Amino acid sequence: MTIEDKVKIARECFSSGKTKSIDFRLEQLSQLEEGIRKLKPKILRALKEDLNKSPYEASISEIGIVLGEIHYVKKHLKAWSRPKRVRTALSQAPARSYIYKEPYGLVLIMAPWNYPFQLIINPLIGAISAGNAAVLKPSNYTPRTSEVIEELVQTYLDRQAFQLVKGGREENQALLDQRFDYIFFTGSPGVGRIVMEAASKHLTPVCLELGGKSPCLVEKTADIKKSAKRILFGKLMNSGQTCISPDYILVDKKVKKALIKELIEQYEKMLPTKEYVDQAFVRIINEKHRLRLEEAVRNQKIIYQDHRISGRHFPFTLVENPDPDSKLMQEEIFGPILPILSYDEIREAFVFIRKREKPLALYLFTKDKKIQRQVLEEVSFGGGCINDTLIHAASPYMPFGGVGQSGMGAYHGKKSFDTFSHKKSIVKKSWYLDLPLRYHPYKKKEEESPEFFFKL
């Protein structure tokens, strides 16, 4: 089928009302869950072939998060879907007021290559839970994973309501030329602008999950050993090809040497042999991106690099005091390179971050609760952790999303349901008591009195 055919079939399915039923939504979520469990060996093999993800890393960062999301959404869906009664303003009495949730309609979900399974299925869960039909576009850079996702969708989900389109830039553009009721995009800010421009032609609402340079602040009171381990957990996950990966470190000069020493020692414990690296360390997605990383560290002061790593892998690299105006510090790294800068006073770090675009994530390592409050109150960012990295993005109890250049809109848990739902405000007016004040002809003496009725 052509892209136009797939869009038409999905839209007609939504128009039939089929996807709006709560029973249908729960059935599709259960089918999706069953399909993931049955296809898990294939999913793991595909992620291994596309990115060299180990079964363990693929399970915790791709499959486990998705299954947890399905479980949480299924448990709460009926409650979320009920009309919510709210207070009625005095000016509208006697009446009852409600908020009804309805699906947008046909949604487009465009996913990236770095977490090719999780970042297409997680928003799909939100789209299904809200009662939408959907067209899915997986990344062309991860063909094996795309094939398994296609099998999952075609075998376990409704074949009219949920369509999948494979391909590259030509197919992406063809999809953006179609009219959708909502677009969910995960990727770079540059492509995000293209998506938003295409959406504007039809005034289509969007959720853009983008990226940015996520800083790690290490304050002098931090536990240096644990800070190093937790920073490395975030940086080495997916070989740094994570939108919320720690992108650079800002560390107090008093503990800088100690932190560098611990980063090196802990890294060599985590990746002890070349054989382990070959087996479990995620590859850079392609040669183009590997060469980009090589260019980023050229002429930089490299203080550590793992020379055991070769081929499509890129060596874990520590860079000291890079030029703030260099590509390394201006563009999202998306690889296992960790620049380290230092400061004398914590406010210098605040100023450094605020001069740049708002990051998708921020990580603060400190025992000082006053500094924790200062960072949360004075620095704008999408979300983050105190004394850890990445883990805030794995919770269905909190929304995940960016701010400014790092994105707009959010999802996960109930926020996914909300993101794919339109909230319809309804006042159910009683037939009893009809205030004459609102009807013509208006009387001079009542010109000021109506204000009273708008005070709650």
Image: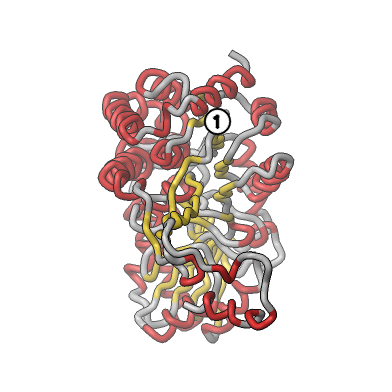
Q: Residue at x 53, y 40 (%)?
A: 104
Dividing the picture into quadrants, the one containing residue 94 is bottom left
Question: What x and y, as percent, mark residue 143?
Answer: 51, 25
In the rendered view, tell whether residue 326 sits above or below residue 387: above
Q: Is residue 334 visible?
A: yes
Q: In the depicted view, which residue is nearer to us: 140 or 100?
A: 100
Q: In the depicted view, which residue is nearer to us: 455 or 349?
A: 455
Residue named by callout 1? 137
Q: Residue at x 45, y 41 (%)?
A: 123
In the rendered view, tell whether residue 384 sits above or below residue 158: below
Is 224 situated left or right of 247 in this image?
A: left
Q: Residue at x 44, y 83 (%)?
A: 371
Display coloring? secondary structure
Question: What x and y, as percent, mark residue 83?
Answer: 37, 50
Q: Is residue 240 visible?
A: no
Identify the image quadrant of the N terminus. top right
Label 1 neighbour load within 10 Å: few <14, some 14-19, many 20+:
many
Is 49 situated left or right of 111 in this image?
A: left
Q: Residue at x 49, y 23 (%)?
A: 13
Q: In the depicted view, which residue is nearer to us: 401 or 293?
A: 401
Dividing the picture into quadrants, the one containing residue 30 is top left
Element assignment for label 1: strand
Number of numbered markers: 1
Question: What x and y, as percent, mark residue 390?
Answer: 41, 57
Question: What x and y, as percent, mark residue 47?
Answer: 41, 32
Amino acid, disc 1: Lys
In the rendered view, tell whether residue 83 sits above or below residue 107: below
